[in-house]
Amino acid sequence: MDNELIPIRLSHLIGYSGIGAIVRGPNGLVVVQDTRQWTDRQGIPAGEPIPYVERVRAALGIKEQLCKPPVARELANGRVDGTSVPATRFPSWMRCPACGAMYRWPWRNNQPDHAHHCSHQDCRRHPKLEQVPWVLGHPEGYLADVPWHFLAHQGTRDPSQRNCKVQDQLRLIERGYEERILRCGACRTATRFRGDERVGFGQGRMQPWTREDLVSPMEFTQEGDKDQAQVLAINDTRVYEPVAESVLVIPPESRVRKGTVVDRLYRNSGDRSRIDSARVPLARKGILRELTTKYRCTLNDIETALANLDSGYPLYGENLTPGQLRESEFRAFLEVLPDQREDEDLVTCNRSEEWRELGMAVDLDADERKIVRGIRHLVRVDRLKAVKVFRGFTRLGGEEVVPPDIVGKSDWLPAIELYGEGIFLALDEDRLKEWEQTPTIVSRLDQLLPRFAQSGRDDPNPVTTRFMLLHTLSHLLMRQIESEGGYPAAALIERIYCANALEPMAGILIHVAVPDIAGSLGGLAELSEPRRFLGILIRALEHSRWCSLDPVCSRHEGQGPGLLNRAACHACTLVPEPACEYGNTLLDRGFVKGDAADGLPSFFGTN
């Protein structure tokens, strides 16, 4: 097990298979260890720094450096080459599916996995052992094995049973559907195991691999302790919730010329440190001459590059304000960049003029012209780069975010670069301002806001009428792109740009992004051809008017998690979870299609 290499996608490692998550490997369940363990044999952090992410860090308000997770590969002889992300087998208890006998750490006897069979003398079949599918979680982020011995004995009144110290004679016996009996063979005590028990966690602040961090030994107390942990099935969504954020790389960082002298110096902090540490001019000149040979350039090229770095390359002193993430991205999509190169990290083609000319085509009817006028900007995104940063995780819906190194002392965060393409559109602001102030539209939102306030959520966009319109329209477009463009909806990602402030925004980016320098093949960006996109938009709006569950869906006052959706269900609007920024909530077809009977106007004016 120590040398077993479990393949995993980097995008999963920054998501639901990240640090602290329980992952299924070929031979059992493991939990991913924290970044303090992501080191090479010399104890040096093995992650590779990601360059040109100053804007990303500023937008997210983080000071830590961003580094890629280490990647190892398995050689033909079965040995592992490179540094891998370590994991610990967990839960540490295994159980016989026939007799219920429980074993802790049976793999510690150095037997191969296939040799882990029940050895209990009363077992007739001696089948292969299975890991127990329950863990103990805490709202502050801690995770541990279920205290089986404590649960078996906590309810007994017999002093001899209550004081039983025998740990290796436990059985978990299944009786019928969802009925389990936890029994101690030493003292004969037995209790029912429900799978949702609560116990006091004591001082055992830990993860399964961090026993050296314990303040004191694990302690469990009777129910009623204020500091309660809960038994959960490993597939319960409350066991693990990653906290990750994705930021697009935009100019000027997206426009840097790879391979230039200034680029190579920017990436090589060691060479810059050597120059800065030179005590006399002669020593400095000698180092620069070495670098001219290394970089195959002139001394003047090195001096010019150093001057650029001193001037703040690549941002050159640009003031970066935390929280201005979406506003900067929105402006970047609308800006027509001169002399774009194919190797830049943001390559766009503004097709807004072609879109507006389409609105004057003689073969369009009145409703189709209204639809065209509802979209102000249409942009083909041939290439984009996103940086996804893992900031930690939570358990049981707790507010405490556990950082990637568990203790919050690391100077770096794991992150990955994602490459892809997409379509960006922005609604007509004049029409939107008129529509969002309609009393019936405002009244419909007011019915949802109290439920949103009760949910305690802190979403990146305020919940307004324009946000509900943009978010629902985004889902309808993704479903239509899946139908017509050949892209599975789970591969698509939405990004909503919404603001009513001094710099209003009303945009949608639908894109794909994969952890590969090649990105995708251009099929999604091609859908931005104006006439083709108009067809997609028209059919998406048509599908918004009717759901197979209507009239129930259209008349719903609240459905979905927290009742935060209205006219939106799996039959009409919801998409796979990875595609939605907001957990498939805050959706309502009523804001898109309108309803003449209720006096709701359609934004596109086609109801």
Image (tube, grey):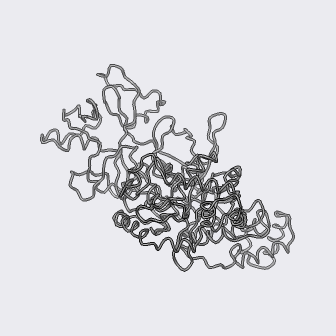
360 or 493: nearer the viewer: 360
Residue at 37%, 54% in the rendered image = 559
311 w.r.t. 489: above or below: below
Residue at 67%, 34% in the rendered image = 76
Farthest right residue? 298
Q: Is residue 92 visible?
A: yes
3 w.r.t. 240: above or below: above
4 or 174: nearer the viewer: 174
Residue at 20%, 38% in the rendered image = 191
Q: Percent position (x, y) of residue 174?
A: 28, 31
Q: Percent position (x, y) of residue 82?
A: 63, 47
465 or 197: nearer the viewer: 465
Q: Percent position (x, y) of residue 210?
A: 42, 52
Q: Percent position (x, y) of residue 208?
A: 41, 48
550 or 251: nearer the viewer: 550
Residue 106: image quadrant is: top left
Q: Is residue 33 visible?
A: no
Residue 497: image quadrant is: bottom right
Residue at 58%, 57% in the rendered image = 45
User: How many tags in the picture?
Assistant: 0
Farthest top residue? 124
584 w.r.t. 600: above or below: above
Tell me: 13 left or right of 559: right
